Structures are given as structure tokens and as C-alpha cells.
Image (cartoon, rainbow, N blue to C red):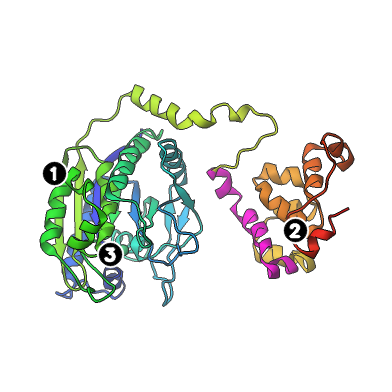
Amino acid sequence: MANIVGGIGASHSPTISFAKDTHKENDPGWAPIFAGFAEIKKWVEAKKVDVLFLIYNDHVTSFFFDHYSAFAMGVDDMYVSADEGGGPRPTAPVKGHAALSRHIANALVADEFDMSFFQKKPVDHGFLSPISMLSDDNAGWKGSVVPLQVGVLQLPIPNARRCYKLGKSLRKAIQSFPDDNLNVAIAATGGLSHQVHGERCGFLNEDWDNEFLELLEKDPDKLVNMRLAEYAEKGGMEGAEVIMWLIMRGALSDEVRKVHSQTYAPSMTNIATLIFEDLGDPPSQKEIDDYRAHIGYELAGAEKLEGTHPFTLETSLRAYRVNDFLHRLVIPEHRERFVNDPEALFDEFGLSEQEKDLIREKKWIEMIHYGVSFFLLEKMGAVTGVSNPSIYAAMRGQSLEEFQKSRNVPIQYTVAGGDNAKRFDT
Ligand code: FE
């Protein structure tokens, strides 16, 4: 089992990134920010933290209102700095612990959290501000992360109770990951009190911030029972993002040891750093075994189904490049270039020789074996003039005629639209 060594709380204000990038270490107005994060850095090194489960929110950089989700967990093996308007920050890419991500993903879904998952999305100051303070230079933090992006900017959003419950499941998920040598810390970011929009912009409440930190340590139930409107009233509308800290608190033992706490309010927000050490006993082997069985319950046995290739997070990461290439066939310009000059397009997207061959030769079943989603095969079929039944037949190793004999009605169809659909209507 992986070990939960403790929890970190840290603001993620862009002020922090700015201070780091512009070298304000020795400026008295900025120095307290560095002092707080230096404590976190020291602790992370002393505790030999391998993985940070990093809870943050994106600020409409990589997650936009065209598809906004509540709990989006990163399942990637690398996270790069986002461009938030003036070019990306110099922070080095951070490694993702994809195997731990997948284990936690399966656990949280088994516990009935409707998670979403992301990869190839750059991370903004919500993630970068705290992580960049864990290294002295821009070489980056040496450990790896599992990021959880919480959508708190478009209402409705999850409440404090939901966040706390997710934390409880997260604890069991991490503690059932089969790696005895892995030290994991839960880092919650955001807050403390602030409001950055509207006439109330600039609102800050240090008394409430201190009370929040006190309750988080000793009486989190009080925070769990608070409504979002109360968080907004006491800590500002954007300050309500501190509900993310309840995920961290839920993932720790009931009793924790506070080893560091600092706040500093230079301008728009009260910048906080906090460290709790976990005092809980590890779960018994039986508890771990039972929870692993619970995680695997829904799909146990599916691996024995012949000719069946479940599309998992592992497949999705491994075959992302080729799936991404084919998904872009929904864009007319990509489609046109694919038809007229495929080789140049293959090279532009860095496809391997094997991937080029799979597409060039329309090796349908081999593409499934490789990890291509069927729903991209049917798009490729629509573009290249191959009907859905022809693809089904090929995957079964049959001629179209043989396949049609196995159906009640031998119809032909495609996902192509408009005039393109007509050429399949035979
Ligand atoms: Fe934020």
C-alpha cells in the first residue's frame, strides 16, 4: 500500500508565480510568500514525498465553458505549463504518476463519484504557483503528481460536503495502491479569502481565514456543513474555492498534527501555507483486499470475453497520438488534407511507421488491437468511403457479403453527413 504522509494547504494566487519568476525573494514586501513555501519545500524533502495529489482549479485556461466538469482528474504522464495570455511560464514540465491516477480513477468511480479525466491539457497558475515553489530554479520538481481539477468557476459547483466525501474515498484509493514504497501527500490549493470580480472586488477577511484554518484542523465537520453562500459571504465569491481544502482534509486521519501554518495578505488575497501530518493507522490487509475487490467489481471477468477490447485509461494514454489524429477528421481542413496529402499530415502529427501503416492500409482490427477507439474508425470510414458494415465485417475477418448474411436486414450506413452520406446509399 502507498503511504499518506500528510496534507498541504497552499494558496495558488498568480502573485506567487509572479514573485518566483521575477525573483522577489529578498524584497520585504514579497519575502513572506517565499518563507511560507520554503517550509513546505523543506517538509516535502524531509518526508521523501514521491507523489503530490494536487487539488487545484483551472482559471478558464484549459477548461472552458464549452464542456465544464466538476471533478476532472489528470491521467497523463506529463503536465506542461499553460499560456494564460502572455506566453507560458518557464516552469519545467512535471511528471504525472499515470498508474496511480488510474488506480484512483477506478476507485473514485467505484465509490460513485462521476469523475471526468483529462490528458494533454496544459496547467495554469492554480497548479503552477505552488509546484514552482518546490524547486529553487526552473528545472522543476523532481517528484510526480496526480492532479485533480475542480470546476469551481461556473455554478452549480460541488459543495463542501461532496469535496470532503471525495477525500474520504481518496484516502482508501491511495492506501490500496500496490506500492509499499510510495509516499503520497495531498496538496490542496486555492484561497484563502478573496474576491476578484465586481464591485465587491478586493474583499478580504483575515479573521475568517484564521477561523477556517483552525476549523480545518480541529473541527472539519463545521466546514463540511457550511453552504457555498456562507463561504462567499465570509471569504469572498472566489474565496469559496477553499472547499477544495476539504478534499485534502477528508483524505487525512481524523486527528492530524499541524506542523506549519502561515498567512500573509499583501494585496488581494490572504496567501496561506499549511502542513498537516497524518496520524492514522494504516488499513489492515483485509481492508485493502476488500477495497481492491470493490474497485474491480464492475469489470471483473470482462477480460475473458473473446474479441473484446475495453477502452481503458491505459489504452487512452498509450494510443492518444493516433486517436487524436483520427479524431481531427471532424475538422473539414484536416479531413481535406488527409484525403489529398496524407503522408505530409502523418509526419506533421508525428505518427510512427506502424501507425501510418495501420491507417494507410485500413487495418481495422489491427487498429482496435493497437488501441484505436471504434468510434474513430467509423469517422475514418466516412472519410475514406468505407461503410460501417464493411468495417464490422473486416474486424470479424469476413467479407461484407458474409457479414450481411448474419444480419436480419443487410443494410449499409455511415456517420458521414449530407452529400457524403449519399455515396454509401447503395
Ligand atoms: Fe484560484
Q: Which residue is mark 2?
A: 416
Residue drawn at 55 percent across, 49 percent down:
317
Question: SS at mark 3?
Answer: helix
- For residue 25, side relative to residue 383 (left or right): left
Q: Which residues are magenta?
A: 313-337
| Residue at the (24%, 58%) spot, across then down | 229
**Residue at screen point 51% across, 58% down:** 120
User: Where residue 182 sits in the image (x, y, percent)?
Assistant: 35, 39
Q: Nearer the viewer, residue 7 or 49?
A: 7
Identify the residue shown where x is 47% and y is 55%.
78
Marks 2 and 1: which is nearer the front? 2
The answer for how far apart the CA atoms under marks 2 and 1 are is 59 Å
240 magenta-colored: no
Distance, label 3 to label 2, CA atoms, is 44 Å
Q: Which residue is mark 3?
A: 238
Mark 1 and mark 3 in contact (Cβ < 8 Å)? Answer: no
- Residue at mark 3: C-beta within 8 A of ligand 1: yes
Q: Earlier in the sequence, mark 2 or mark 1?
A: 1
Above or below, comparing residue 224 to residue 192 in the picture: above
